[in-house]
Amino acid sequence: MKAALNSSRKQGKISKYIYGQFAEHLGRCIYEGLYVEDESIPNKNGMRTDVVNALRELEIPVLRWPGGCFADDYHWRDGIGDKSKRPYMVNTNWGGVVENNHFGTHEFFELCEQLGTEPYICGNVGSGTVQEMRDWVEYMTFDGDSPLANERRANGRKEPWKLKFFGVGNENWGCGGNMRAEFYADQYRRYATFIRNYGEEPIYKIAGGPNSDDANWTEVLMKNISHATNGISLHNYTFEHNWDNKGSATQFDKDGWYSLMADAQRMEKNICLHEAIMDRYDPENKIDLIVDEWGNWFNVEPGTNPGFLYQQNTMRDVISGMLILHIFHNHNKRVKMANIAQMVNVLQSMILTEGEKMVLTPTYHLFRMMKGHMDGEKLDIDYNGGEIDVDGVKVPKISVSASEKNGAVTISMCNVSLDSDEDIEIALRDRDFTSAQAEILTSKNMNDCNTFDAPETVKPKKLDVTLNGGTLTLKLPKMSAAVITLK
Ligand code: AHR
């Protein structure tokens, strides 16, 4: 494949927040995965040292919490103060297990501080009250003298926390209340009114947006709340076939590989669908599309709790992940944040844990390799790597994206094909480069995954590339993802 990188053709910033993450009180994401009370597992104030250290490498820009469906069942007051006195609840969304509320607001901010990430909190519209939501914001962010701010101080936090992103409900068309779009729009107006700005920076409000291709939801929201929101969320998961036929994370054949890649293309289709509606109401592009739940959703690993959504992770997750991240890059004008679901032990996670053991998933390596794009200026790269026809859906065989930050150019590319390697030749226009470094993520078999017994089956390696005058050449093997840094 021949391509041309046009370094002087800049195409807008790729918001770092599209590399955001999501951690819900679901299965073993928070408890066991991130937070432990078992002192035999090394931790700092409850946060697992091994997991935090690994996640810090990703430079995660933003973390969404406490859900997901859990958010609309969560009452923040249950998660503050003396842990031994915090009320228990049943996590009815996720396995009916007991939630002891030992991980609450203070613990979440502690986790964010340890990770060096910005918090994004999702409030409860479905079963909460306006007062509950407004009080939570005051408790977290007010610097002055008020009963709520003083209660925060009494609970150990003197300074207010910096909180920029706040979600007004989650999936309110479903687990967040089964509302009609019109009803939610009215609820949004009411709840959002009372989310006050106590800190220096105004709170960036995110409305609970559509599921997948629900154009009506977006239309109603844009018509009724566009004056009162900063962003509208979109949830769009990827399945091997569809919601009713999710497939196994590891036991798939060639058809399963390609049909997942075809379903990943729904992200492009759905972003275009919602963007077109947003463009009509908001031609000035003031409201962002926030894809705050995305990723591959498979059947749970055999023998695990069906409500815990625990799944393995292979090269299939890496390639579909890069395809989708490139879709976000291409829509950088409207898509300003995305949060992959979820951080640890749930869905397409970065990390899996078992007791004191931890493994990094192939998706973790993808996110580590892609870091150079965060807040980079997107660059034009011309290429045509051909398409693969999957039952009428056109999947790019090769997908490439380029950006520039601090003088370095990052080029990411993947080869979706299971059969053919690709020789890549990129003409480097408008700029001279003197060095090229590259990493590649691939594996022997498409089903390979990292297990607690073999944690390094899928891991990045150095890739040999040639920089000759104004041309970069490399071989991109089948079923691989590579990231090149040019200086
Ligand atoms: O990420 C798992 C669940 O998927 C979330 O709780 C919900 O918002 C979505 O349906």
Image (spheres, helix red, strand yellow):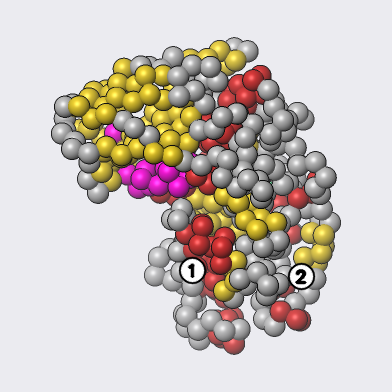
Name the amino acid, label 2: Asn
Q: Residue 400 has which mark?
A: none
Secondary structure of the residue carrying numbered label 1: helix
State which quadrant residue 76 falls in.
Answer: bottom right
Name the amino acid, label 1: Glu
State which quadrant residue 234 falls in.
Answer: top right
The image position of residue 95, as x and y in percent, is 82, 53
From the viewer's perspective, is residue 431 above or below residue 397? below
Q: Residue 113 has which mark?
A: 1
| Quadrant location of the C terminus in the rendered image | top left
Q: Crowdedness of circle 2 by 10 Å Cα count: few (<14), some, many (20+)?
A: some
Q: Is any atom of residue 233 visible in this view?
A: no
The magenta stretch spans residue 475: no
The image position of residue 195, as x and y in percent, is 54, 64
The residue closer to the viewer here, 297 or 328, is 297
Secondary structure of the residue carrying numbered label 2: loop
> Does the beta carbon at disc 2 come under 8 Å from ligand 1?
no
Residue under numbered circle 2: 100
- The tag earlier along the polypeptide, 2 or 1, is 2
From the viewer's perspective, is residue 74 above or below residue 173? below
Q: Point out the stretch of residues depicted in magenta.
A: 366-379
Query: Which residue does the image show at 50% across and 84% down from the upper left?
Result: 158
The image position of residue 402, as x and y in percent, is 33, 34
The image position of residue 327, as x and y in percent, is 46, 32
> Does the beta carbon at disc 1 come under 8 Å from ligand 1?
no
Query: Which residue does the image show at 49% across and 68% down from the upper left?
Result: 113
